[in-house]
Amino acid sequence: MTEPEVRQAVLDIIERIAPDEELGDINDAEPIREQVDLDSMDFLDIVMELRKIYGVEVPEEDYVELSTLERSVAYLSPRMQDKELAAKV
Amino acid sequence: MNEDFDTLIIGAGMSGLAAGIRLAYFGQRVLLVERHSIIGGLNSFYRLRGRDHDVGLHAVTNYVPKGTKGKPLTKLLRQLRISWDELDLCPQLVSSVAFPGRRLRFSNDFSLFHEEVAREFPHQADDFAKLVTLIRDHDELDLSQKATSARAVIGDVLSDPTLIDMLFCPLCYYGSALEHDMDWNQFVIMFKSIFFEGFARPRRGVRHIIKLLSQRFKKNGGILRTKCGVERLDVKDGRVASVTLDNGDVVNAERILSSAGLAETLRLCGKEPTGDDEQPGQISFMESISVLDRLPSDLGHDETITFFCSSDRFNYRVPEGLSDPTSGVICSPNNYAYDEPLDEGIMRVTTQARFDRWDAMEEPGYVAAKHACYEASLDEVVKFVPDFRPNVVDVDIFTPRTIKKFTGHDNGAVYGAPHKRLDGRTHLENLFLCGTDQGFLGIVGAVLSGISMANLHLLKS
């Protein structure tokens, strides 16, 4: 998976969790939770979806790496390079 | 036959179904067992003489319009990956709390209730505004808090005993396991769910919700078995080692989530619930469902739910006799904003009832007593709503004994044990509780109970 695909994978997961949120004009450098209405339960679901769909484990001490889209892509890209972008549901 | 699962869930009510959806969605092998042929538990349905009836659900509480952020209904839909539209909720028309000479109407817009309190109790208007702020600022989702008397908290803010009773009446009926009082946290949950948020109902009633949840559970890969009770939990070295079903089959599961109730679950482990904090609840109800020859609106009745009390003081406690007709809940499932009206008019009346008196009765006295209590309740009810008695074409009545039979809960307790286990833990390391004894009540509460216990204990890697 390329970096743009990893970005898309994260956005697809957020859309799956919060289908009513507008994600079109999200700023990659700003914290996701300041732009999208996600509570702590929703945020944990991002981690769980990463495990479910891509088999990627994000330990609790690394949750901060998922705070922005930019950081998520940097953190996840090496861990997801062998994976294919999953189809949207 | 020997089978292995990650999680076995006891009871296919709202909480067990919700937990199952989460666990199966994230890849667990989940077995959900239900002793009865029909699922839903306290919120279920049946068919009688050609008509579909609901049990439990008068209204889905916590209703907020589509797109509202950060509310319990929105949270649970996200957690279950169910879209708002799939619930098919239609909002209520208007409801009220009716006491002798007093009526506080409320709707899904809180300002109506606030105005009504200020109109009926002008001397309490400022204090009521303070109470509203106190409730708004309370974090009811904090699982670490200690039980506090709501009567004590309210008594510090309000002084008019009738106003206090008029607040407690709907909140107790929709979610208190305690006599006379409520836990303050539970009071806040119920106040927000009824007054800040509101009532709605799918046109097809509770069937629609149960079908939606069970289909989602199965679609996610969960296995649901009905007519499949748990005979016992086989305990070894501080954990449940295996589960023996009523039919003798043995099932192995890493973890067990039980909605059977704390005392009931302990007994499945061969442990008598002897502790003060292990006792089952006592609060139970009887309910009548009257089918009318016309719609309630044809009789001039437009209220969705009417919480009534015909005596000077509101009593919430196990009555001395079979039932206490002097307070209760009147629900007309017709009075929601449906696209097209329901086929028939229905009036449901719920009153407090005493399990042991009903349980000791034998036929045919039982049936006669049901009808006598029904007549007595309607004598009180028609003080607050139009007299629909001449229009009744069919009636069905159930009692605490019926509730016990279909839920398996001791005493037919509707809101579970007075002492809640908010963290869902038990004396065994892999056995957890959800449902009424864990502590979130009502339909939305039950679903959140299943979700939060699944997240807290069962989804950790």
Image (spheres, grey):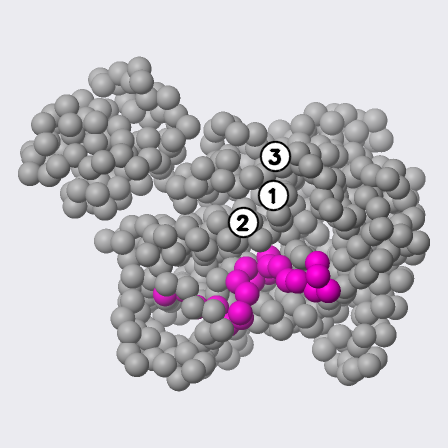
Q: A44 and A13: which one is in front?
A: A13
Q: Nearer the viewer, mark 1 or mark 3?
A: 1
Which element type, helix, strand or loop, lies under badge 3? helix
Looking at the image, residue B380 sits to the left or right of residue B363; the answer is right
* Amino acid identity at mark 2: Ile
Q: B451 and B178: which one is in front?
A: B451
Residue A12 is one of the magenta-drawn residues = no
Q: Position of residue B309 (x, y in %)?
A: 84, 49
- The residues bearing labels 3 and 2 have C-alpha atoms spaced at a distance of 19 Å
Which subunit holds the residue at mark 1?
B
Task: State the quadrant of the C terminus of chain A.
Answer: top left
* Amino acid identity at mark 1: Pro
* Residue underneath mark 2: B209
Residue plotted at (21% across, 43% down): A53
Q: B97 and B185: which one is in front?
A: B97
* Residue underneath mark 3: B197
| N-term-proximal mark, 1 vs 3 | 3
Which circle marks residue B202 in the picture? 1
- The residues bearing labels 1 and 2 have C-alpha atoms spaced at a distance of 8 Å
Residue plotted at (65% across, 39% down): B199
Labels 1, 3: one chain = yes
Residue plotted at (65% across, 67% down): B403
Region of the chain picked out in magenta, as a range: B31-51
Residue plotted at (69% across, 72% down): B401
Q: Position of residue B382 (x, y in %)?
A: 90, 49
Q: Is residue B380 visible?
A: no
Labels 3, 2: one chain = yes
* Amino acid identity at mark 3: Glu
Q: Position of residue A32 (x, y in %)?
A: 29, 24
Task: State the quadrant of the N terminus of chain A.
Answer: top left
